Image (cartoon, grey):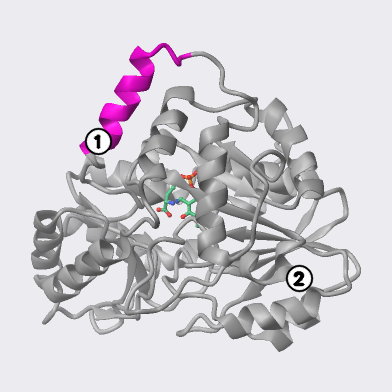
Amino acid sequence: IKSKLPNTGDTIFSVMSALAAEHNAINLSQGFPDFETDPVLLDLVNKYMHRGLNQYAPMPGVPELRQVVSDMVQRQTGHSYNPENEVTITHGATEAIAAAISCCVREGDEVIIFTPAYDCYAPMVELNGGTPIFVQLEFPNYNINWDIFKKQMTHRTKLIIINTPHNPSATLISKEDLVQLQEIVEGTNMLILSDEVYENIVFDGNEHHSASSFPALAERSFKIGSFGKSLHVTGWKLGYCAAPAQLMAEFRKVHQYMVFAVNTPMQYAIAEYLQHQERLEISAMYEGKRNTFLKAIEGSGFKPLPSKGTYFQLLDYSAISDKNEVEFAKELTTKHFVASIPMSVFYHIPQEHHVLRFCFAKNEETLHKAGSLLKNIG
Ligand code: PMP
Ligand code: GLN
């Protein structure tokens, strides 16, 4: 058949994880924890499975979990979403992103995406007949240049995709940035997709700023989160979308025919688990892992860029090699047995900054081993 996505190959996460497995390398490429979640949560899944809650959940998600999401988002942002018609539980953030884009992007619409960008946005825009418009974050701080952004806006701009804490750069969108964005979109019909899957992972006393905290953004935003990230269970593929009723009604039309509903016992288990917690306190744990990784590479030729959130650390290898990022990431995996992700793949037009992304959501032992391997290079 004639491909609808002629320029899309296997996602880099599959490619690098396969290469890591083939060469028995420490896999710091694809972002997922190598440690277990709280056994209390596992016991709760077991409990609900044995209670017989094994059939279809309600299409928008089980009410208990939608209530928990609504409460958590309210505490985080001050914005209140009605669990009845403004919150939907999704098959990971990935499905939420696909449904949000599919319910609003039409043939001819333009969608602004900041690069480097997580890789699932642009293909979904294209599948829906839209055109991704890429705006580059400024290297090496990955700041948004709002003058450049404004020049890319047209009467066709339908959707703006933001992501904070940001994968892959590990930076945060500032309050000032969101105020800017609010001023820009006020009075327009532009919508916002706010990918906040790392909302609970922010370091060094910094704060996560959500689009939902700003009324003129909240009224036009799909706020998206992931229990996979927040509870260390990426394989469960459970997430959520919160949006104003009018947007959520359209979102659910897509969700109900994309997946209809998602895993029932796990939704009940997560709801009960989170009911007892004011906030998910995982930042300190991940900040500790970041620091362990940074300590483990001290004295190597790799130079760290600031990691302010997410579970990623960027390392500049320009003192070690002048190979391009893809080549060097492959060499690092096959010859030195540490897998990472080349940053160039997150750009529309590959940029070469000699920077790789490493995932530190790993046991201490894994991080120490990776550190000693990286110290032997150069
Ligand atoms: N957005 C970003 C920025 C991500 O890093 C990820 C996970 N890699 C997702 C969305 C997808 O999340 P999920 O695994 O819940 O589908
Ligand atoms: N979010 C993960 C990352 O950025 C990967 C998710 C995936 O494999 N699709 O590494």
Residue 231 shown left or right of residue 255 in the figure: left
Q: Is residue 206 magenta?
A: no
Pick the front one: 177 or 297: 177
Q: Is residue 43 magenta?
A: yes
Residue beneath the point at 65% across and 48% down: 123
Mark 2: amino acid: Ala
Place residue 364 in its image quadrant. bottom left
Q: Position of residue 299 (x, y in %)?
A: 11, 82
Total tally of numbered discs in the picture: 2
Question: For mark 1, what is the residue?
Answer: 40
Residue beneath the point at 39% across and 57% down: 279
SS category of the residue bearing label 1: helix
Residue beneath the point at 31% across and 28% down: 44
Pick the front one: 44 or 115: 44
| Placement of 55 over or under 278, stated as above or below | above
- Numbered range of the magenta stretch: 39-54
